[in-house]
Amino acid sequence: MEPLEIGRIEQELEKLLSDTAQALSKADQPVAVEEIRVKTLGRRGGLNQFFNLLGQGVLTAEEKGRLGQKLNAVKQKLEQAIQERQKKLDKTAGARASVSEDPTLPGILPQGGRLHPISQTILEILTIFQEIGFSVVEGFEGETEFHNFDALNIPPEHPSRTESFDTFYLAKERDAEPSRLLRSHTSPMQIRFMQGRQPPFRIVVPGRVFRPDAVDASHCFQFHQIEGLAVAPGLTFGDLKGVLTVWARGMFGSQTRLRFRPHYFPFTEPSAEVDLACIFCAGKGCRVCGQKGWLEILGCGTVHPAVFKAVGYPVGTIGFAFGMGVERIAMLKFGIEDIRLFFENDLRFLQQFP
Ligand SMILES: [Zn+2]
């Protein structure tokens, strides 16, 4: 073989290199790269034809050495170029796979916020009262003995004022300070509201209250109340019954029946406890109502004259008041049997209230 022919072979090898590089740059699938590899480096590939020349006895020993070196260099370059292209495609495919491994799987929903079942119940109760003209006002959780007890006609010897039994008193910094406490009901806000205003008005007061009760399935040291107060000339007990019936039907359905039983509260006279015809058995008697057919649901009455006197209203002022426990109503409404569930922050419980 003439030296010229070696030169031509070398030119062809260079062309193989540049053609392969161009083909690789266009190969955007691993299968295309593999095709190029077979075509150039495979057993019957382009490069092997040149290797075959070495064994055909047409080249001198010197030419064989020169061509052999050249072939090995070209082979190395081809292998490297193919490998690099393959790596690059693998990398892109990997990145794509990590964001969409299986597009048919459901996505991960972000945790949405929602209202606690107690907040939902408070809002529902308040909305009904607002629809019949009541305004919502809120008081303080820390109160004075005057607002929590004295002004509400609860005398100093009343058992509910017993320290460490019915009331959380707050520590005093100086003995001369008046006693302060965590409110044991939302009624102090009735006093605060009346101290600054003249009737007529109707308000509802939602809020958290505190009593040192031992915690069990139906008691907790904190719970929520909603208090109502209406003061206007000419109001009667009939108005009170009407307001509570409208509320109960809005809350539990249009067939709901209420029963008023005489009771005693220091701040109302006359007073009544109100029972709801059992919403689970329609009054027939079941496990929830203890076979009685009625569920205790709230207390109410005509405001005691001593309360109006404490806020400086004239003799003859007329009004009615009522108060209910929110947890009790939420437990009835949602069929919850343990009050502690409300305060444990267990998402498995809370997520059941959309
Ligand atoms: Zn029942």
Image (spheres, helix red, strand yellow):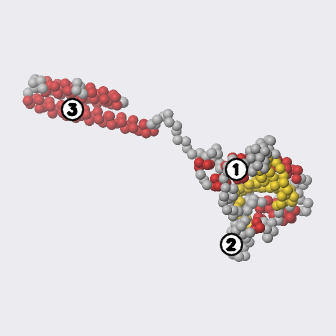
Q: Amino acid at mark 3?
A: Val
Q: What is the CA distance from the residue labelled 2 to the residue labelled 3?
A: 93 Å
From the image, tell me which residue sits under label 2: 172
On the rendered image, what quadrant is the C terminus found in? top right
Residue holding disc 3: 74
The answer to whether the residues at label 2 and label 3 have Cβ atoms under 8 Å apart is no
Q: Quadrant of residue 74?
A: top left
Q: Is residue 145 above or below residue 64?
A: below
User: Within 10 angstroms of label 1, few (less than 14), some, or many (20 or more) residues?
Assistant: some
Q: Position of residue 289 (x, y in %)?
A: 75, 49
Q: Which residue is mark 1?
A: 331
Under mark 2, the amino acid is: Lys
Sequence-wise, which precedes: disc 3 or disc 1? 3
Left or right placement of residue 18 versus residue 155 in this view: left
- Other residues around mark 2 within 10 Å, as few (<14) / some (14–19) / many (≥20): few
Q: Secondary structure at mark 3?
A: helix
Visible residue check, residue 223: yes
Which residue lies most toward the bottom here? 175
Residue at disc 2, CB closer than 8 Å to ligand 1: no
Q: Secondary structure at mark 1?
A: helix
Query: Measured from the top left, where is residue 249 in percent x and y?
Result: 79, 44
The three-letter amino acid code for the residue at tag 1 is: Met
The residue shown at (14%, 25%) is 53
Residue at 81% over, 64% down:
152
Q: Is residue 171 above or below residue 192?
A: below
Depth check: give the residue in front, 37 or 62: 37
Answer left or right for 347 relative to 334: left
Q: CA distance from mark 3 to mark 1?
A: 82 Å
